[in-house]
Amino acid sequence: MIVFKGVSHPALADIMGHMTTRHYIAMFDDGSYHFLNALFGWGGVNATVDKNGWADVRHVIDYQAEVGVGDLLEISAELVKIGNKSMTVAYQMHNISRGTIAATLESTSVYFDLDARVAIPITDEMKEAARAFIKP
């Protein structure tokens, strides 16, 4: 599922002329919010009203091909697994301009009580909704 589309603007480049590392994470992070909404209908209002959210606890990033200024990027996401308190998602950043995969990210996040600041159980309803998205 496509969760993000963007452009590698000049302001995102480092002194060597390619997109700098910090902006890969920003794009993956933006896409993660779209994916959470698709999976669970979760959005920022849930953090404010329900006081529940998500905390990333593990990232594995593989940079596969250079992203230059002006490249068009698209990120897709697939749910790898969902557990009792955490889920793992695989993201791919596609460089549409060059026809390459620019980077991949495997991210593990825990469901999080924003007041108590601890991981909490993912509800049965959330697990059921997520099953339709699990990568075969």
Image: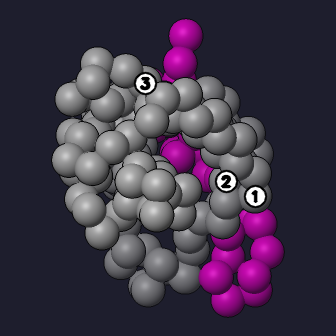
Q: How far from the left and from the top, in percent, is residue 68?
A: 33, 43
Q: What element carries label 1?
A: strand
Real-space Cα distance between discs 1 and 3? Answer: 24 Å
Q: Is mark 2 on a helix, strand or loop?
A: strand
Asked which quadrant contains residue 26, the reply is: bottom left
Q: Nearer the viewer, residue 19 or 2?
A: 19
- Mark 2 neighbour class, 10 Å CA radius: few under 14, some 14 to 19, many 20 or more: some
Picture layout, residue 55 above or below residue 37:
below
Disc 3 marks which amino acid?
Answer: Ile
Which segment is the magenta one? 112-136
Real-space Cα distance between discs 2 and 1? Answer: 5 Å
Kindly identify the residue that appears in the image at 52 percent across and 45 percent down. Answer: 125
The reply to whether callout 1 and callout 3 are in contact (CB within 8 Å) is no
Quarter of the image where the C terminus is located: top right
Q: Is mark 3 on a helix, strand or loop?
A: strand
Residue of label 1: 57
Q: How far from the left and from the top, in percent, is residue 94?
A: 35, 29
Mark toward the start of the polypeptide (2 vs 1): 1
Residue of label 3: 101
Q: Which of 131 and 96 is in front in this view?
A: 96
Kindly identify the residue that appears in the image at 27 percent across and 50 percent down. Answer: 69
Q: Which residue lies furthest to the top in this view?
A: 136
The reply to whether callout 2 and callout 1 are in contact (CB within 8 Å) is yes
Residue of label 2: 109
Left or right of 26 on screen, residue 63: right
